[in-house]
Amino acid sequence: MKAKTVIVTGASTGIGKAIAQLFMEKGSNVVINSFSKERLQDAYEEFGSPENVVMVAGDIGKKEVGQQLIDTAISHFKRLDVLINNAGVFQPKPFLEVQEHDLDQFLSTNLKGTYFASQAAVRQMLKQGEGSIINIGTVLVDHAIANLPATAPISSKGAIHALTRQLAAEFGKNNIKINTIAPGIIRTPLQGKVGVEDADSLAGLHLLGRIGEPEEVAQAAWYLANSEFITGEILNVAGGHTVGHAI
């Protein structure tokens, strides 16, 4: 495969970091993004400060940051092949306690970030005559958990699932593929942030009897990025979470 140019948002930790590292190791040119300049720099140095990786720090919820990512890919690597909309926030909160600012936060980072970065990417991909966009959703959109009240972030992720299918329909004729990966419980810093001290205690939610690893989501992203006949799909990477439970 020829070297592709890939943008990964939310690339300083967890799933995004694993995706960026896999594509980098496979020889792709990678533009990495994070809200935190310091964490982004740490990830870049951990990668070994490679020449085929460029950093763009900024809040993806701001439309201009999405455009900056595309401009950076073009200025450094002359094209954009894949946009991976990984950046997102998640925090459980009971429905009746959700305030307007809570909902705004999830809609801004999760939905607006994905929407406007994709808009900027599609403009470039139309010029090239091809491209691939991979969003990160969640299995919780289609498989709710009573003990995890998270209507605000899940609503924003549900919108991303819907956006995926609509964009696939609108731009299929232009050879632009749009898909979403819906992870199950993955071993990332997110569990600690939402108060789960032992992520492995959630293994029973998956038929495989374990939680997933960030590298396994990265492998799915690599697959979709190199697939020429898949679009509009929601790919569950969840160990059977949506099929049944091991408990």
Image (cartoon, helix red, strand yellow):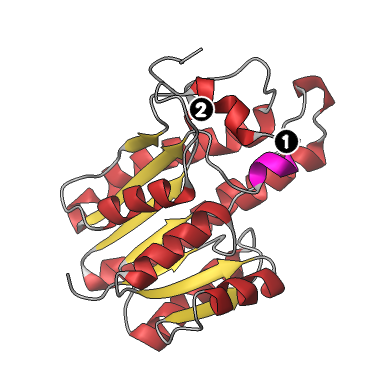
Question: What residue sits 51% from the left and 27% below the top?
Answer: 141
Q: Which mark is residue 197?
A: 1
Q: Position of residue 221 (x, y in %)?
A: 35, 52
Circle 2 packing at 10 Å, graded few (<14), some (14-19), many (20+), is some
Q: Is residue 211 left or right of residue 75?
A: right
Question: What residue sits 17% from the left and 69% below the top?
Answer: 1
Whether residue 171 can be seen here = no
Is residue 159 covered in magenta? Answer: no
Q: Which mark is residue 170?
A: none
Q: Which mark is residue 141?
A: 2
Q: Position of residue 197 (x, y in %)?
A: 72, 36
Q: Give the vertical position of 170 relative to 79 (above or below).
A: above
Q: Label 2 amino acid?
A: Val
Q: Nearer the viewer, mark 1 or mark 2?
A: 1
- Count of numbered circles on the image: 2
* Of pointers 1 and 2, the one earlier in the residue sequence: 2
Question: What residue sits 58% from the left and 52% below the top?
Answer: 112
Q: Give the vertical position of 199 relative to 118 (above or below).
A: above
Circle 1 packing at 10 Å, graded few (<14), some (14-19), many (20+), is few
Q: Nearer the viewer, residue 91 or 204?
A: 204
Q: Give the vertical position of 112 relative to 206 (above or below).
A: below
Whether residue 151 can be seen here = yes
Q: Is residue 224 left or right of residue 195?
A: left
Q: Secondary structure at mark 2?
A: helix
Asked where in the image residue 162 lies, by quadrant, the reply is top left
Q: Label 1 amino acid?
A: Glu
Q: Is residue 93 left or right of residue 53?
A: right
Q: Position of residue 83 (x, y in %)?
A: 40, 62
The part of the chain drawn in magenta is 190-197
Q: Are marks 1 and 2 in contact (CB under 8 Å)?
A: no
Separation (CA) of disc 1 from disc 2 = 23 Å
